[in-house]
Image (cartoon, helix red, strand yellow):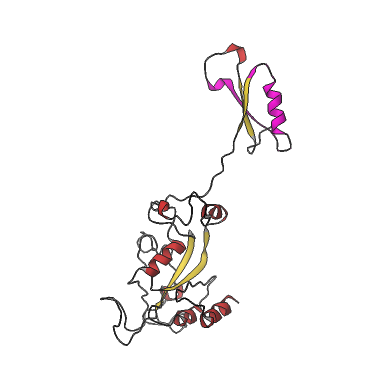
């Protein structure tokens, strides 16, 4: 016999008439995958010095994060298994930071600790336009028509403060796609919150980069066309206006092609 970590069993024996308990009475052996476990166990059980024979199960593991709000994310795992089967998927992959997901929503709070992290100067899961970040302030370093768009863009530019929250940024497009309603930040958290870090919620993708594009009150196509020249691996949008839009699908499909 030889060791095989995938199939093992224990043999309890009483050599020399020992009556006290102890690990010296247990013999653990493993067999090769081409041998029949039941037959081998029966042969050992037939030996007079063997008291009992039992298989040792291999306990499967799955990727379950240690985030403090993991128990609240019922959509990833629940006893009924009417869920996303996320732990099984995370056994295969937890994502890739080369994948960028554009979040076209109400903006994202970039300094949220479960998104931007807690490291000074770090960006956590938030995408960065490094051409602009390392460029000259006030200059369109990457030539996409937007100046200093380091972390996305705010497309909101209203003629008046209609239906806006007091203190909300509603005038003039700018390079600060901050979130005043919380919806976009929540969406970003479901997509890719910092995960398995002992705090907050768990993201669907543990490794990803999110590009916030604030398009509230505006046509979503503004943000979609901004994505078009950007070197993305992935671009995604979950609209909530109740019907499909071929106008939005066209640039996204062109970008993927």
Which of the 4 image quadrants contains residue 165?
Answer: bottom left
Name the spot of residue 21 as percent of width and height, x first. 52, 18
Q: Residue furthest top?
A: 17
Vertical arrangement, residue 145 with respect to residue 109, above or below = below
Name the spot of residue 40 as percent of width and height, x first. 71, 28
Give the quarter of the figure containing the N terminus.
top right
Q: Residue furthest left?
A: 166
Asked whether residue 134 appears in the rendered view, the answer is no
Query: Would you say 9 lies left or right of 69 here?
Result: right
Front residue of 17/147: it is 17
Vertical arrangement, residue 245 with respect to residue 82, above or below = below
Front residue of 256/76: it is 76
Which of the 4 image quadrants contains residue 29?
Answer: top right
Give the quarter of the figure containing the C terminus.
bottom right
Name the spot of residue 186 as percent of width and height, x first. 39, 65
Front residue of 10/96: it is 10
Q: Tag count in the figure?
A: 0
Residue range in magenta is 22-50
Vertical arrangement, residue 36 with respect to residue 181, above or below = above
Q: Residue furthest right?
A: 34
Which of the 4 image quadrants contains residue 136?
Answer: bottom left
Name the spot of residue 65 as percent of width and height, x first. 46, 51
Query: Would you say 98 lies left or right of 214 here?
Result: right
Front residue of 122/112: it is 112
Asked whether residue 164 appears in the rendered view, the answer is yes
Q: Residue furthest bottom?
A: 159
Task: Please say whether residue 73 is one of the residues in the magenta stretch.
Answer: no
Residue drawn at 70 percent across, 31 percent down: 38
Vertical arrangement, residue 21 with respect to residue 185, above or below = above
Task: Please say whether residue 46 is one of the residues in the magenta stretch.
Answer: yes
């Amino acid at each position: 016999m030889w060791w095989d970590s995938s199939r093992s069993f224990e043999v309890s024996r009483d050599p020399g008439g020992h009556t006290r308990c102890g690990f010296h009475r247990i013999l653990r052996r493993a067999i090769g995958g081409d041998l029949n476990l039941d037959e081998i166990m029966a042969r050992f059980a037939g030996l007079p010095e063997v008291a009992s024979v039992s298989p040792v199960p291999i306990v499967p593991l799955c990727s379950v994060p240690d985030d403090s709000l993991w128990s609240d994310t019922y959509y990833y795992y629940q006893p009924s298994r009417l869920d996303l089967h996320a732990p099984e998927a995370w056994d295969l992959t937890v994502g890739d930071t080369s994948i960028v997901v554009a979040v076209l929503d109400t903006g994202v709070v970039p300094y949220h600790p479960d998104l931007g992290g807690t490291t000074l100067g770090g960006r956590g899961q938030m995408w960065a336009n490094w051409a602009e970040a390392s460029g000259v302030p006030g200059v369109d370093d990457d030539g996409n028509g937007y100046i200093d768009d380091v972390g996305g863009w705010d497309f909101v530019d209203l003629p008046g403060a209609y239906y806006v929250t007091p203190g909300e940024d509603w005038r003039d497009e700018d390079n600060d796609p901050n979130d005043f309603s919380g919806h976009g930040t929540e969406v970003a958290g479901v997509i890719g919150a910092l995960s398995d870090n002992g705090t907050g919620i768990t993201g669907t993708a543990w490794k990803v980069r999110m590009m916030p594009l604030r398009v509230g009150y505006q046509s979503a196509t503004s943000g979609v066309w901004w994505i078009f020249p950007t070197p993305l691996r992935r671009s995604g949008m979950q609209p909530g206006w109740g019907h499909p839009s071929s106008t939005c699908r066209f640039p996204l499909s062109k970008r993927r092609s």
